[in-house]
Image (cartoon, rainbow, N blue to C red):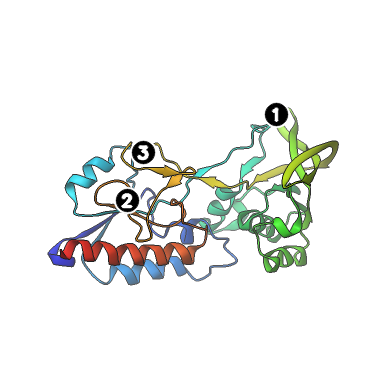
Amino acid sequence: AMYGHDIVIFESREKPGGLNEFGIAAYKTVDGFAQREVDFVLSIGGIVIQYGQELGDGLSLEQLQSDYDAVFLGMGLAGVNALQMPGADADGVVDAVDFIAGLRQSADKSDIAVGRRIVVIGGGMTAIDAAVQAKLLGAEDVTICYRRGKDQMNASGFEQDLATSRGVVIRHWLQPEKVNATDGNVQSVTLEYTSQADGKLAGTGETMTIAADQVLVAIGQKLEASGLGSPVKLDGGRIATDQDGRTSADKVWAGGDCTNSGDDLTVTAVAQGRDAAEAINDTLKH
C-alpha cells in the first residue's frame, strides 16, 4: 500500500499463480507451491487481485495509464505457435501447454485423455514436460521429434536425460510434414529428415512415418499482443524495454517472457519484476 494507494493485479484466469500454477509439469511443483507463494504476497496487504481481466477484452492500456500512476505488464507468452501443416486440425493433435495445464488443474489424473502412442513435436522444456507426463500417465510409446541436433535443444541435458530415463525416445533432425488421420483421428505423423549447412536448416526430402494416436505440439509460445494497442513498441514480436523494464509507453513497465529481454526462465521474470518495482518506486518518489 505504497503512499496509501492499492496495488491492483489484473489476472486473466480465475486463479492466480500464472505459469507456476498452470504451466509447469505437475511432477515438478508439488504441494500447492504456487498457491502458497501467492498467499504470502497477498498477506503483505494493500494488494487486490481482479480475476477474468484480460487486456483488450474490456480492459485497455490507455485506461490503465490514466487510472494508475504506473502499470507493469507481465503477461508472459500466452499465444501458442500453431502447427502449419496438413492434418494439424485432426482429433488427437493437442497443444502441449494446454495438456500440461489440464493435468495441473485436475484432481484426478484419470480424466486426462492420454494416447497409447504419442509423438511430441518440439525441443524445449514444454516438450520434455509433456513427454514425461504422458509416460507417467501410462502411454506406451512416447517419442520427441526435434528438427535440429541434440546440442541445439532448448531443454537442458539434465532434462533430456530425465526424459530418456523414463523411457521417452528423443529423435533429432526430424521436422513434421503432415499428420495422417482416418475419420478425423490421428493415425501417424510423417516427418522429414533435416540437415544443417552454414547454420541454415533444410529438409533432405527423405521422410519417415511414426504411428501415433496423439500428437503433442510444443513448438514455442508467442506474445498475444492484440490487446496492447499502439503505444507500446515491440521488438522481434516482444515488448521492447530498457534495463529498468521501461517500455516506450508513458508510465508503463514490463518484465518476463513478454519482453525482448526475457529468456523464458521464471527466475529471470521474477528478477525483472523486482527491478521494475524499484524503478517504479523511484519514479513515484520524485
Amino acid tagged 2 = Tyr
Tell me residue 52's x, y (percent).
Answer: 34, 46
Depth check, front residue: 96 or 205: 205
Q: Mark 1–mark 2 contact, CB under 8 Å?
A: no
Q: Residues within 10 Å of mark 1 (few under 14, many from 20)?
A: few
Q: Secondary structure at mark 3?
A: loop
Q: Is residue 173 visible?
A: yes
Dividing the picture into quadrants, the one containing residue 185 is top right
Give amino acid for label 1. Answer: Pro
Q: Residue 88: image x %, image y %? A: 66, 33
The residue identified by callout 2 is 51
Q: Secondary structure at mark 2?
A: loop
Are the residues tagged 3 and 2 within 8 Å (C-beta)?
no
Q: Nearer the viewer, residue 37 or 64?
A: 64
CA distance for labels 3 and 1: 30 Å
The alpha-carbon separation of the residues under discs 3 and 2 comes to 17 Å
State which tag comes first along the sequence, 3 or 2.
2
Residue that badge 1 annotates: 86
Quarter containing the C terminus: bottom left
In the displayed structure, would residue 217 be above or below residue 28? Answer: above
Q: Quadrant of the N terminus?
A: bottom left
Q: Earlier in the sequence, mark 1 or mark 2?
A: 2
Whether pointer 3 and pointer 1 mark residues with C-beta atoms closer than 8 Å, the reply is no
Residue at image position (37%, 63%) is 273
Check residue 276 in the rendering and tell me which mark sits there, or answer none: none
- Residue under the point 64% across and 57% down: 154
* Amino acid found under the numbered disc labelled 3: Gly
At 73% from the left and 49% from the top, the residue drawn is 146
- Give the quadrant of residue 27: bottom right
The residue that label 3 is drawn on is 227
- Could you give the CA–CA distance between mark 1 and mark 2, rounded to whole angstroms? 37 Å
